[in-house]
Amino acid sequence: MPSAPYVDLHSHSTASDGTLTPTELVNAAQRVGLAGLALTDHDTGNGLLEAQAEAARIGLRFVPGIEITAEFRPPVAMDILGHFIDPTSSALQQMSHLLIEARDSRNPKIIARLNELGCNITLEQAQAIAHKKIPAGQPFVLGRPHIAQALVDSGCVASVKQAFDVYLGSGGSAYFDKARLTPRQAIECIHNAGGLATLAHPVHLAIVNPTELQTLVAGLVDLGLDGIEVWHADHRPQDCQLFLSIAHRYNLAVTGGSDFHGRNKPDVALGLGKGNVAVPVAVLNDLEARWHQRSGTFAAPASPRTGETL
């Protein structure tokens, strides 16, 4: 990492589809010199208490988060990040249960289609991969990266990337969509869990016209959107400038992160992305200040938020 203090506000652990446990992820953030880290697993907060405890132990500033996939234009989805959420929120746990059930209902369909296509893997193989680093009895999220790794292990494909390109990505021969929340529901869920809601990696929405994107963001602001992810591993410099200008137009918080998944995205480094992500600690300071400003609206979480006193 550069000598200046930087943070990573978008990362994943084995609680969803990353390859580092929450504890390992926190320690990795310290090793690369990050001043702060947000854990934002897909549709679950199961790893947050573990990560939070380790961050407090080693003195790393930590933000509990989540990434919720919402409806957009099939097969393209919209991801909403939540920051400063309460890991013990009943609203969060109920939402997570529903979304994990949606993932679970499509996984057997994916496996069956893969078998039809000559890839002889089982659901149990994918579950074993997902559970490999999760302590016994702790819930986990089975996702497509775990199925992709099972395809690699079986010799059906040479890499996780090839598994997504050929079979599991949108348009792949074994792709099935899943039930999702609406953007309104995702934002409300994050707010009900005490957090701030941010539009994740807008470039993934594949909107070419800047005016169209601005109109979309304006609609999300009406639904309560708090911020927009400006820096991301898949954002070009011109993308960052556009998203920054939209943030300023609507007085949105700006966030950024690598979207680190460990070995499941080997070209994305924690804190650096693809060498194009360097989020200054001032971004986290502003995000935290905005969260405090909203504390009169949202119930303040009971559990400690970071390795330092807020």
Image: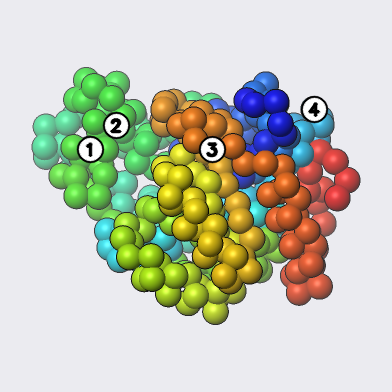
Query: Residue 106's spot in the image, x, y percent?
Result: 31, 52
Q: Is residue 296 above or below residue 62?
A: below
Q: Amino acid at mark 3?
A: Val
Give me the C-alpha separation between circle 3 and circle 1: 25 Å
Residue 121 numbered tag:
none
- Residue at left 26%, top 44%? 169
The 10 Å Cα crowd at callout 1, few under 14, some 14 to 19, many 20 or more, is some
Q: Earlier in the sequence, mark 2 or mark 4?
A: 4
Q: Amino acid at mark 4?
A: Ile
For disc 2, the marked residue is: 161
Check whether the beta carbons of the residues at disc 1 and disc 2 lie within 8 A of each other.
yes
Q: Please give the count of numbered marks on the rendered protein.
A: 4
SS label for mark 2: helix
Q: Earlier in the sequence, mark 3 or mark 4?
A: 4
SS label for mark 3: loop
Is residue 67 visible in the rendered image? The answer is: no
Give me the C-alpha separation between circle 1 and circle 2: 6 Å
For disc 3, the marked residue is: 277
Q: Amino acid at mark 2?
A: Lys
Residue 165 numbered tag:
1
SS label for mark 4: helix
- Going by the picture, which residue comes out furthest to the right? 309
Q: Earlier in the sequence, mark 3 or mark 2?
A: 2
Q: Is residue 53 above or below residue 267?
A: below
Check whether the beta carbons of the residues at disc 3 and disc 1 lie within 8 A of each other.
no
